[in-house]
């Protein structure tokens, strides 16, 4: 699928669920970070293709694709695979922004690769790409209040006013971190943004 890699093309993916009812949920932090990134780049992510909303722009001499899969979270990989295969973008040039319950709101963690860690959107992307070798920007959304609390209910719930305030800073940082990975590589981006807190 990825025989000919195009090192000058990058794809940034923001994960979430389509639909008004999910807009402010924990699971939609990837979409929200993407909206900020697109605004910063002066692009609208509004073309419907590859089972997602996408657009492309030029960034520092590279072709940059922005994608919000519209498959619902658990099938996100289908959209990512379709776009990346069509434009010949290798996994190491695909940056995924998504929610992470192991980090408190306001914190970020940049990783070069790794397992899904229980996140169904990442699990789908790994499965479809056949690779774990893609960078991630994890956006803290806070842990479940009790172990018994249903995980699906938690990630589809919205934030308290205090957490929303912390989150607003980390969403901006996530958008900057994705570009920092392209500009400087994962180690430097991680050094700058890991553990960042308002």
Image (tube, helix red, strand yellow):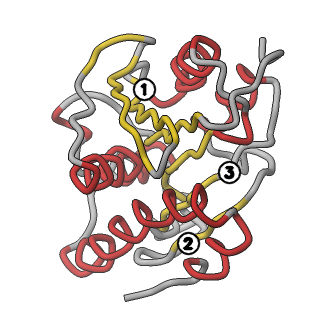
Mark 2 or 1 closer to N-term?
Answer: 1
Residue at the location (35% across, 26% down)? 54
Quadrant of the drawing holding the N terminus: top right
Q: Secondary structure at mark 2?
A: loop
Residue corresponding to mark 3: 135
- Across the whole image, how many numbered discs are drawn on residues? 3
Residue 178: where, in percent of width, then height? 51, 57
Please identify the quadrant where the C terminus is shown: bottom left
Residue carrying label 1: 69
The nearer-to-camera label among 2 and 3 is 3
Q: CA distance from mark 2 to mark 3?
A: 17 Å
- Which numbered mark, 2 or 1, is in the foreground of this view? 1
Question: Which quarter of the figure has residue 106?
Answer: bottom left
Q: Is residue 44 left or right of residue 132?
A: left
Q: Which mark is residue 103?
A: 2
| Mark 3 and mark 1: Cα distance apart in space | 17 Å
Relative height, residue 57 to residue 171 (above, below): above
Res 44 quadrant in image: top left
Q: Is residue 109 or residue 94 the one in the foreground?
A: 94
Identify the mark nearer the N-term, 3 or 1: 1
């Amino acid at each position: 699928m990825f025989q000919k890699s195009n090192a000058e093309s990058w794809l940034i993916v923001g994960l979430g669920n389509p639909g008004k009812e999910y807009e402010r949920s924990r699971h939609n932090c990837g979409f929200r970070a993407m909206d900020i990134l697109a605004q910063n780049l002066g692009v609208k992510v509004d073309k419907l293709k590859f089972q997602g909303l996408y657009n492309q722009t030029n960034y520092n001499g590279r072709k940059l694709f922005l994608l919000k899969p519209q498959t619902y979270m658990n099938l996100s990989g289908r959209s990512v695979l379709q776009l990346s295969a069509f434009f010949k973008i290798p996994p190491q040039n695909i940056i995924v922004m998504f929610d992470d319950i192991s980090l408190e709101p306001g914190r970020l963690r940049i990783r070069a690769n790794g397992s899904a860690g229980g996140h169904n959107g990442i699990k789908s992307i790994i499965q479809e790409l056949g690779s774990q070798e893609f960078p991630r920007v994890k956006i803290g959304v806070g842990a479940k209040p009790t172990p018994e609390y249903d995980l699906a209910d938690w990630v589809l719930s919205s934030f308290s006013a205090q957490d929303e305030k912390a989150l607003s800073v980390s969403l901006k940082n996530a958008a900057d971190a994705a570009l920092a990975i392209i500009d400087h590589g994962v180690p430097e981006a991680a050094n700058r943004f890991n553990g960042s807190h308002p």
